[in-house]
Amino acid sequence: MAASKAVKNDICRRYREAKYPDRQIQILAELNSMSKVEVIGILTGNGEKIQRRTVNQLHKKMETLKKKIAAAEEEYKENAANADYSKYNRLDRLDEEIKRYERQYREIKEALSTDKKEGWEERLWQDLQ
């Protein structure tokens, strides 16, 4: 879902005013019918500073997704090599699972790198030191 400029500005304003920014990301996601990753992408894209804990959680989720993708791809290869008709349904499910994990991974990566051109991550680490 592509958010309008007004919605993006409202999300940023509410995030800045929040007493508990980490909790506010989830609240904003629910209020705007979008994922937490989309909210974080909007925030970083508009120059908002995200708490290090949130960034670390996203990096951990990316690592978990990488492992899940690798495991699903391995199982897919094993099943494809020994394919008979009964395994085709499992191959289709694995293929969908891999695509879902890859999409989640790309969304997180995009959210974290939205403002990279302007040195967002570097500024974040400097601010935290």
Image (cartoon, grey):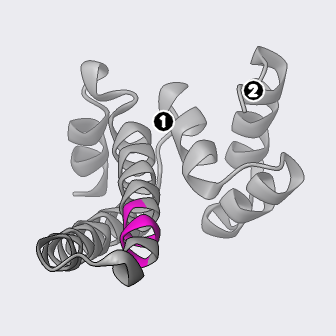
Prevailing SS of the magenta stretch: helix
Residue under the point 41% across and 54% down: 99
Image quadrant in which you'd find residue 121: top left
Residue indicated by mark 2 = 3
Is residue 93 in the magenta section? yes
The range drawn in magenta is 90-95
1, above or below 50, in the image: above
Residue indicated by mark 1 = 44
2, above or below 64, in the image: above
Q: Earlier in the sequence, mark 2 or mark 1?
A: 2
Residue under the point 68% across and 67% down: 20
Residue under the point 71% across and 64% down: 26
Instruction: From the top left corner, tell me how far across and down residue 35 is, in percent.
Output: 66, 54
Q: Quadrant of the N terminus?
A: top right
Asked whether 65 or 112 is in front, the reply is 65
Q: CA distance from mark 2 to mark 1?
A: 14 Å
In what element is the residue under mark 1? helix
Q: Is residue 73 left or right of residue 65?
A: left
Image quadrant in which you'd find residue 72: bottom left
Q: Is residue 56 left or right of residue 15?
A: left
| Disc number for residue 128 | none
Q: Amino acid at mark 2?
A: Ala
The answer to whether mark 2 and mark 1 are in CB contact below 8 A is: no
Count every numbered label the image shows and give the total.
2
117, above or below 57, in the image: above
Asked whether 1 or 20 is in front, the reply is 1
Q: Is residue 28 left or right of residue 74?
A: right
106, above or below 10, in the image: below
Q: Is residue 16 left or right of residue 27?
A: left
